[in-house]
Amino acid sequence: MTRPTLPATRAAALALLSLGLSGTAAQAFSYTDVQLHYGDGFRLGRNGIEETSRAVLTLEHFSTFGYGDFFAFIDLFNDFDGPDTNTESGHYGEAYLHFSGKAFGLGLGDGILRDIGADIGINHGDDFGVGLIGARADFNVPGFNVLSLGLYSYNNYLDPFDRDLDSTYQVTIVWNAPFEIGNQKFTAQGFVDFIGDQGSGVDDQIVFSPQLRWDVGNALGHEPGKFDLGLEYTHFNNKFGVTGVDDNSLTIFAAMKF
């Protein structure tokens, strides 16, 4: 069973999403991001319940269209620890289509609620698949480029343990907050998912994944917002609903945006 836990890339996408949609909904905007992560503390990978180290190459894309936006990423990863010296490769990806309420004429004024709209998504890996449908609200909060709340119906169509899983819910909070220390630019971003239980013996889950990014391109006198170095911590409580099996992983990463 080899699903990675790097969906914090969603936070970067939502940051640009909100910036891109802060003007007219029809404004075209897109970016592609390449990230390389390395760290340890991953369970239920090639080393079973024991921890494994993992390297991940992430390709991420975000773009807006007249009525919303599209976001997708794919992780290509290798686990290094296990019963032999060979590595084990795998993949995991997510794709989300969002329809902006403002683009359909929903008047929200200039209050704390920036936008609200409908989402449809899919999360898929080598032996894991989930379909999601729901809504996301984006908020105007000083100091944050992004603060959003999503509520989704969560339905497995592929399970790594071949269990008969009930449908449940997922609540997602995403944040992105830039700050500066001296002339150095940083970003604190991340997300937390709350996923309900899915029947007898399949516990509820929490995925908490904050990142701290340092804008190295800016520090070296180049264009800001193009090259970051960072740290990402992920706590995955009751991973895949398995009671008491938790990830506490820490990765270092480099990210380049095109």
Image (cartoon, grey):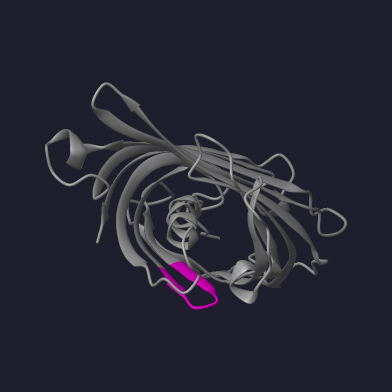
Q: Nearer the viewer, residue 173 or 162?
A: 173
- Can residue 162 be seen here? The reply is no
Q: Let me know if residue 70 is in the magenta part.
A: yes
Q: Residue at x 49, y 78 (%)?
A: 66
Q: Nearer the viewer, residue 16 or 197?
A: 16
Toward the bottom, the furthest residue is 66
Q: Nearer the viewer, residue 185 or 213?
A: 185
Give x and y (percent) for residue 62: 41, 66
Measured along the vertical axis of the image, is residue 233 above or below residue 102?
A: above
Q: Is residue 119 left or right of residue 63?
A: right
Q: Is residue 23 left or right of residue 229?
A: right
Q: Let me know if residue 221 is in the magenta part.
A: no
Give x and y (percent) for residue 165: 79, 66
Quadrant where the N terminus is found in the figure: bottom right
Please state the extent of the stretch shown in magenta in the rendering.
63-72
Quadrant in the picture for residue 129: bottom right
Q: Residue at x 83, y 53 (%)?
A: 201
Q: Residue at x 55, y 77 (%)?
A: 67
Measured along the vertical axis of the image, is residue 61 above or below residue 6?
A: below
Q: Is residue 222 left or right of residue 94?
A: left
Toward the top, the furthest residue is 182
Give x and y (percent) for residue 86: 33, 56
Toward the right, the furthest residue is 200
